[in-house]
Amino acid sequence: MNQNDNISALPKVVDRAAWQAELDELRIREKVHTRVGDAIAAARRRLPMVEVDSTIPLIGPDGPVTLLETFEGRRQLVVYFHMWHTGRPAAKQCEGCTFSTTHINELSYLNSRDVSYATFCQGPYEESSRYRLLSPEIGFESSLLNVVN
């Protein structure tokens, strides 16, 4: 690789008016993109609802828990389903799920708006709860419940 290869990868240098003209064209495309994304999001919000089986068996730190109990007396419940891989060490769990669940550690905002939050995963509660308790910095601050197969 020589110095000219590196330069050819850079955009061309133009005067301010040419740059502004290209930016204006790009903004038109960006606005179309935004409107399409908004339409897709609106269609997603209009999707029909599915009734959730309220008898789904859940296990918490004190044993079996009903789905209704996970609401903790609040009107709404947000559930994050952590893709737990039974038998794998913490370092081999889903990176995206681990990242998400470890960054949800302050629930007062949700709770003040009548919303509870819980993390669900499948597999043995004893195993996933050990992961939760490894350290407060990487554990779940929300309810951790396991869905019984």
Image (cartoon, grey):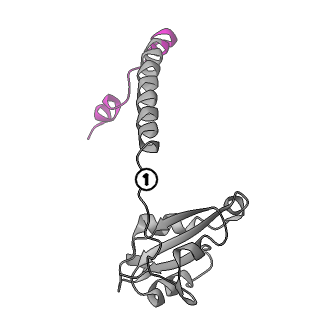
- Using the rendered image of the protein, determine whether residue 139 is visible from the camera's viewpoint: no
> Residue 104's spot in the image, x, y percent?
59, 65
Question: Looking at the image, which is closer to me, 42 or 100?
Answer: 42
Circle 1: residue type: Met
Please determine whether, in this image, residue 117 is positioned above or below residue 144.
above
Residue found at x 47% / y 72%: 54
Crowding near the residue tagged with mark 1, few <14, some 14–19, many ≥20 C-alpha atoms within 10 Å: few
Quick check: is 123 in the magenta stretch? no
Determine which residue is flagged by label 1: 49
Question: Looking at the image, which is closer to me, 41 or 3?
Answer: 41
User: In the picture, residue 105 is in which quadrant?
Assistant: bottom right
**Which residues fall within the magenta stretch?**
1-20
- Using the rendered image of the protein, determine whether residue 71 is visible from the camera's viewpoint: yes
> Residue 60's spot in the image, x, y percent?
54, 84
Question: Looking at the image, which is closer to me, 20 or 48?
Answer: 48
Residue found at x 73% / y 60%: 112
Q: Secondary structure at mark 1?
A: loop
